[in-house]
Image (cartoon, grey):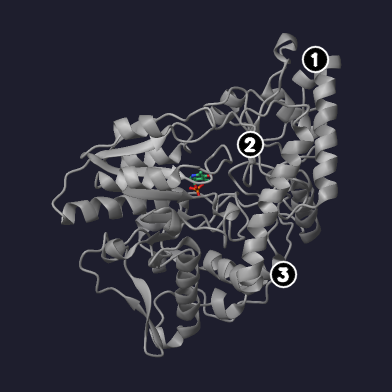
């Protein structure tokens, strides 16, 4: 599998497309543009035929891996199958040809779709109002903490502490720091829950918020969530819900029921937008009524039968991005929501949890399960007895590539050593889960019988084992034809 750069396939004068003769009077470009905007050198574009181009990109696409190719149990990321009908809807010309500055009366359908999506997501999360603006989960976190900050300020309060559990996703402490808060970590207990006594000691009159993921990043439901919410609220703090794991609880419980005040969702995880490849994503933020005035503007509202962008929000934190939302992603989420319906969404969560528990039980005799209790939509595990051979979790993950899988998340969360975090998602069938489990067992056997082979994996991928630090800092993007 060698593939040259398209520039290496280029031959002067070779073309992939023939354009008709120009019937507009020609004018030199330097008569149209100021000199400092003109290119100094010829534009370097590859010159290839249509067939060369198609073959080049098709070959490249076959070196890639995605959910549409095979199993992708990347915990926390929810790499589930995204129904193609969502793409079809987002590609309707009525949506793709809109301009964000069109008059409202010409975009009533798009505004209605945004309005409905706001309402559905608010209902699912148990919040009173929702903004679709943030561009991803981390951006939703920032939006949520800025809302909390503005709310506290409006009450004349100066609280600057944000508490995060030690199992939290790295974006949580990063966001709190970026929003100007001091971050304090609270440890987990032996069942994988927030240590309630440790939390009690940390919460005080300076506490602005607790950021929590539930189910948490160990795939475990916070059993003391009601008590946790009381502790924080009693001290005058707020609860922020990281909704990356919302796919485990839809239609069963909600952050609103648990006592959260602010939530973000990741539409590219739970609500069926392909995830990765640089986006775009979408991280809507929902709040309880008291915080509604601080949401980013504009919101989409309905005024009698007319939908409009509403800017009259004097306490709003302002705009968090250009225009109104990652609109195409919102169309996909809306399509997913109405095609699943209430019953379908609940069944999504039930199957996500069922699949994770099934896979966990299939592997329990072969891998160590540090928190041996019913999991939610994902679980953590680690290899046992491999240290003598020097085989690490990284090696197992690399070997999975040879078996045609995207490996699970590894070395996160940080509190379990040599951890693997598996999220099968609800869209996989039993045969796939069984086959994966069998192959993991095979790889674990290989790790005992032929550890050097596993340590040198992958063997069958276009590129072998990389020095990951060098690869990240000094990537070689040209395929070597050695
Ligand atoms: C993915 C994830 C985030 C960050 O979301 P992005 O959309 O990638 O910015 C935050 N918290 C958790 C638990 C996550 O899994």
Say whether residue 411 is left or right of residue 263.
Answer: right
In the rendered image, residue 186, in percent from the top left (x then y), is placed at 39, 31
Residue placed at 72% from the left, 69% from the top?
A: 18
Within the image, what quadrant is residue 447 found in? top right
Question: Which residue corresponds to mark 2?
Answer: 373
Within the image, what quadrant is residue 219 found in? top right
Depicted 464 relative to depicted 235: above or below: above
Residue placed at 18% from the left, 52% from the top?
A: 153
What is the number of the mark on residue 18?
A: 3
In the rendered image, residue 88, in percent from the top left (x then y), is placed at 67, 72
Say whether residue 20 is left or right of residue 206.
Answer: right
Sequence order check, earlier mark of 3 and 2: 3
Q: State whether label 3 is within 8 Å of ligand 1.
A: no
Q: Secondary structure at mark 1?
A: helix
Crowd tier of the residue under label 3, counting other residues whose Cα lies within 10 Å: few below 14, some 14–19, many 20 or above: few
Residue 405 showing in the rendered view: yes
The N terminus - image quarter: top right
Give the residue at the far top of this rendering.
388
Give the residue at the far left of this rendering.
156
Question: Which residue corresponds to mark 1?
Answer: 452
In the rendered image, residue 179, in percent from the top left (x then y), is placed at 30, 44
C-alpha gap between disc 1 and disc 3: 55 Å
Crowd tier of the residue under label 1, counting other residues whose Cα lies within 10 Å: few below 14, some 14–19, many 20 or above: some
């Amino acid at each position: 599998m060698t593939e040259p750069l398209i520039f290496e396939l280029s031959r002067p004068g070779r073309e992939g497309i023939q354009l008709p003769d120009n019937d507009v009077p020609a004018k030199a470009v330097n008569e149209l543009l100021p000199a400092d905007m003109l290119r100094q050198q010829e534009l370097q574009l590859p010159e290839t035929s249509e067939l060369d181009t198609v073959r080049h990109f098709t070959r490249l696409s076959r070196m890639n891996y995605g959910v549409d190719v095979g199993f992708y149990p990347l915990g926390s990321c929810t790499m589930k199958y995204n129904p193609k009908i969502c793409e079809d809807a987002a590609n309707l010309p009525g949506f793709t040809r809109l301009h964000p500055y069109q008059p409202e009366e010409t975009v009533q359908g798009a505004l209605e779709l945004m309005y409905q999506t706001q309402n559905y997501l608010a209902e699912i999360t148990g919040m009173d109002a929702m903004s679709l603006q943030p561009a991803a989960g981390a951006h939703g976190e920032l939006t949520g903490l800025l809302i909390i900050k503005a709310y506290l300020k409006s009450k004349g309060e100066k609280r600057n502490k944000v508490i995060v559990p030690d199992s939290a996703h790295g974006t949580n402490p990063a966001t709190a720091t970026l929003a100007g808060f001091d971050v304090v970590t609270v440890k987990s207990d032996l069942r994988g829950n927030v240590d309630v006594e440790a939390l009690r000691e940390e919460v005080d009159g300076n506490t602005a918020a607790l950021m929590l993921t539930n189910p948490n990043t160990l795939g475990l439901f916070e059993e003391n969530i009601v008590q946790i919410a009381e502790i924080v609220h009693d001290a005058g703090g707020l609860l922020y819900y990281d909704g990356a794991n919302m796919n485990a609880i839809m239609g069963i419980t909600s952050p609103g029921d648990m006592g959260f005040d602010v939530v973000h969702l990741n539409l590219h995880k739970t609500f069926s937008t392909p995830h990765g490849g640089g986006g775009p994503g979408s991280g809507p933020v929902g709040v309880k009524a008291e915080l509604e005035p601080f949401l980013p503007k504009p919101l989409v509202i309905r005024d009698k039968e007319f939908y409009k962008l509403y800017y009259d929000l004097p306490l709003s934190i302002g705009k968090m991005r250009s225009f109104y939302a990652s609109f195409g992603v919102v169309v996909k989420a809306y399509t997913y929501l109405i095609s699943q319906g209430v019953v379908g969404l609940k069944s999504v969560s039930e199957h996500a949890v069922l699949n994770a528990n099934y896979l966990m039980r299939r592997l329990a005799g072969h891998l160590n399960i540090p928190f041996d209790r019913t999991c939610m939509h994902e679980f953590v595990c680690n290899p046992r007895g491999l240290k003598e051979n020097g085989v690490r979790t990284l090696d197992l993950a690399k070997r999975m590539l040879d078996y045609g899988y995207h490996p699970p998340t590894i070395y996160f969360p940080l509190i379990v050593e040599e951890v693997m975090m598996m999220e099968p998602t609800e869209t996989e069938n039993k045969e796939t889960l069984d086959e994966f489990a069998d192959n993991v067992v095979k790889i674990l056997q290989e790790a005992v019988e032929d550890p050097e082979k596993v340590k040198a994996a992958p063997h069958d991928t276009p590129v072998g084992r990389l020095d990951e630090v060098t690869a990240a800092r000094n990537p070689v993007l040209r395929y070597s034809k050695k």
